[in-house]
Image (spheres, rainbow, N blue to C red):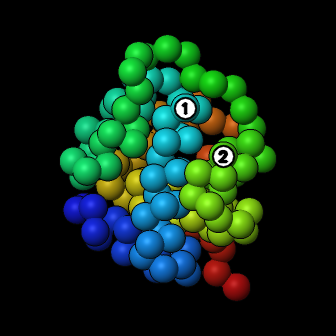
Amino acid sequence: MAEPEFYARVSARAGVSEASARALTEATLRTLAERISGGEAADLSEHVAHELRPLLARARTEDPQVFGYDEFLRRIAERAGATAADAERGARAVLQALHRVVGPAEFNRAMAQLPREIGELAQPAPRV
């Protein structure tokens, strides 16, 4: 999926402008890269558009930082200049789009490194 298509998908899923979708995508991918191992982040980066790869890159393959759901969303909100609600919707949209691009096997390996609450963001919302 090309970079503009990825941003458009995030924009539509999160209900935000494309500019906000870009900021939320960048913030989410950077925060995700901090929370998973460097090797796993590198594996994910191989599947995304060339322009998005640096967002998942880490200088070394050191151990991931340990933080939970609230901190995950706080970092995204701060980096994107977004509200907490937009950060949560944006993270959900980004992770769902990433799942589609990466495929289930690789994506599930990355999600296995996260607390359950963060991983649940990648699950589609139930239809009511």
Q: What's the mark number on residue 61?
A: none
Q: Is residue 123 visible?
A: no
Please name the residue shown 41% across and 16% down the image. Answer: 60
Please name the residue shown 59% across and 51% down the image. Answer: 79
Q: Nearer the viewer, mark 1 or mark 2?
A: 2
Q: State which tag comes first along the sequence, 1 or 2.
A: 1
Question: Residue 85, located in which quarter of the rendered image?
Answer: bottom right
Query: Where is 79 relative to 55, above or below?
Result: below
Work out which quarter of the rendered image holds the C terminus and state it: bottom right
Q: Give the x, y percent position of residue 27.
A: 52, 51
Q: Nearer the viewer, residue 112 or 77?
A: 77
> Given the image, on which type of amino acid does mark 1 rest?
Glu
Q: Nearer the viewer, residue 104 or 21?
A: 21
Query: Local crowd at mark 1 within 10 Å, few (<14), some, or many (≥20)?
Result: many
Residue identifier under label 2? 75
Secondary structure of residue under mark 2: helix
Question: Residue 127, located in which quarter of the rendered image?
Answer: bottom right
- The answer for how far apart the CA atoms under marks 1 and 2 are is 10 Å
Query: Where is 81 relative to 102, above or below?
Result: below
Q: Give the x, y percent position of residue 109.
A: 47, 34
Query: Where is 128 relative to 32, above or below?
Result: below
Query: Where is 99 relative to 19, above or below?
Result: above
Secondary structure of residue under mark 1: helix
Q: Nearer the viewer, residue 94 or 83?
A: 83
Residue identifier under label 1? 34
Please name the residue shown 32% across and 49% down the image. Answer: 52
> Given the image, on which type of amino acid does mark 2 rest?
Arg
Q: Give the x, y percent position of residue 107.
A: 43, 43
Question: Residue 63, located in which quarter of the rendered image?
Answer: top right
Q: Is residue 81 visible?
A: yes
